[in-house]
Each structure stands twice: as structure tokens, then as C-alpha cells.
Image: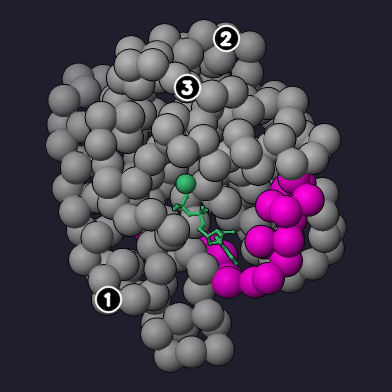
Amino acid sequence: MAIIAVAGRKGGIGKTTIAGNLAGEFAGLGWTVAVLDSDPQHSLAAWAGQGEGMLSRCVEKVNGRIADALRSKAHKAEKAAGVVFIDTPPGMPEAAYEAALVADLMLLPCGASPLDLFALKEALSLALKARAQRRSKKPRIRFVPSKVLLNTNLGRSLSSSLAQMGKKVLPPIGQRIVVAEAVAAGLTVGEFAPGSAAHAEFQELAKAVDKILRR
Ligand SMILES: Nc1ncnc2c1ncn2[C@@H]1O[C@H](COP(=O)(O)OP(=O)(O)O)[C@@H](O)[C@H]1O
Ligand SMILES: [Mg+2]
């Protein structure tokens, strides 16, 4: 049983996209998957509601007092699922902090702009603060290069910039139109465009995350 939280200071950096598509890839790898949408904007639930794919069957909204709901639902969902993904709101507010208190793995996506890197530093220190509160089962923290333009210098150097910030860096997700098209169809990239370059990237990321969980 594993809990994976996707978090970050900035909105629009790909948290929801990564949570949903990783959930899709994990289902493909044979895991039983649950997804908790703890963002009051409920973008992941909205994405799931656009279609009839795997997300429509495994996304659950977290409402009310986010901190309590998140913790109890995460544990409840954990019983039925092999892996629980928690999508969190931007800003690392209470919901993200609570997710950090229950997660086995924290994924912090980051874009290539220097502003993204500044925000990541703050997200990391908040994640470390939550981590320090836990006496056992301290979560692993990993960076995920997100919405990367691989044909730009900034994009190409992102992984090495991130590596200098002291946490391991997972395989990057490029900025690709098919990722947004899949959302419009209510599907994961693997369902919408199997075999595409975008799908291959999410598969690589899922493989790396799966390896961490099996350690
Ligand atoms: N790899 C990507 N390629 C293209 N568009 C992306 C990618 N990741 C996210 N997006 C788009 O960027 C916007 C913000 O992404 P989202 O996952 O909602 O970020 P967050 O959850 O961090 O606010 C959405 O419109 C989404 O479709
Ligand atoms: Mg989001």
C-alpha cells in the first residue's frame, strides 16, 4: 500500500496532469489505483468527468475540512487500493501539508523558468517541514521536471538544475499538445494516445516511481 502526493507552490505546473496520468500508468502496471482530488478547484475530478476512462472510476473528491478529510480518506482508500495518488492545491496550504504527513512519496513537479525553481525551493522546505514532523515512515521526496520544452536550453538544463537542489530528479515530462487533448477527452494520455511520445514519457516516469515503491 503506497500513498503518493503530488504537490507544489505554483499553480499550472502540471501537478494534476502528473497525478492523473501516473494513476493511469500505474493501473496499466497492474496496481489497484485510487485518486484523491484535494484541490477545491477539483480539476482532476473535472477531467475525469469529461469521459469514461479509468479516471472516471477512480477519482474521488475531498471536500469539507481538507486536513481531516484527506487523512481519513487517504487511509480508507488505502485499504482498497494498492496505490493512492493525492492531487493537492497550489500554494502548499493545509491540504498539501496534510498529504505530506501521510504520503510515502512526495512528487514535486517543476517547470524550467527560474520562477518555477524559486517556487520549488519553498515547496521543498514545506515538504521537509512536514517530513520532520513524522517520527516514522518518512516520505521520500522527488522532483519531476514538468511541461519541459526539450528544444530549448532552459528545458534541456532543467534536470541538472534540479539535481543541484539536493533531491533526486525523476524522468521529465515534455510540454506536448496531446497531454491537453487527453484532458479534453476525459482520458489519460495512455488511453488517448497510446504509443505517443507523451505516453512514453509518462511510462518512463511511472517505471521510476514504481521502482521507488518496490524498494
Ligand atoms: N506536459 C504537458 N504538456 C502540455 N500541457 C500541459 C502539460 N502539463 C500540464 N499541461 C497543461 O497546463 C495546464 C496546467 O496543468 P495542471 O496539471 O492543471 O497544473 P497544476 O495542477 O499544477 O495547476 C493545464 O491546462 C494542462 O492541461
Ligand atoms: Mg491542479
**Residue contact between numbered discs 3 and 1, judged by CB atoms under 8 Å:** no
**Among the two numbered marks 2 and 3 on one chain, the one whose residue lies closer to the N terminus:** 3
**Among the two numbered marks 2 and 1 on one chain, the one whose residue lies closer to the N terminus:** 2
Q: Position of residue 62 (x, y in %)?
A: 47, 22
Rounded to the nearest angstrom, the CA distance separating label 2 from label 3 is 17 Å
Q: Is residue 74 left or right of residue 66?
A: right
Task: List the residue tagged with mark 3.
Answer: 62
The residue shown at (23%, 50%) is 124
Amino acid type at image mark 3: Val
Q: Is mark 2 within 8 Å of ligand 2?
A: no
For mark 2, does the 10 Å Cα neighbourhood hold few (<14), some (14 to 19), or many (20 or more) residues? Answer: few
In the image, residue 36 lies in the stretch drawn in magenta:
no
- What secondary structure prevails in the magenta region? loop
Specify the quadrant of the image occupied by residue 12: bottom left
Rounded to the nearest angstrom, the CA distance separating label 2 from label 1 is 40 Å
Task: List the residue tagged with mark 2.
Answer: 79
The residue shown at (25%, 36%) is 93
Q: What is the secondary structure assignment of the residue under circle 2? A: helix
Q: Is residue 55 left or right of residue 64?
A: right
Q: What is the secondary structure assignment of the residue under circle 3? A: loop
Q: Which mark is residue 114?
A: 1
Magenta span of residues: 167-189
Q: Is residue 68 left or right of residue 47?
A: left
Amino acid type at image mark 2: Lys
Q: From the image, which quarter does the N terminus lie in?
A: top right
Specify the quadrant of the image occupied by residue 153: bottom left
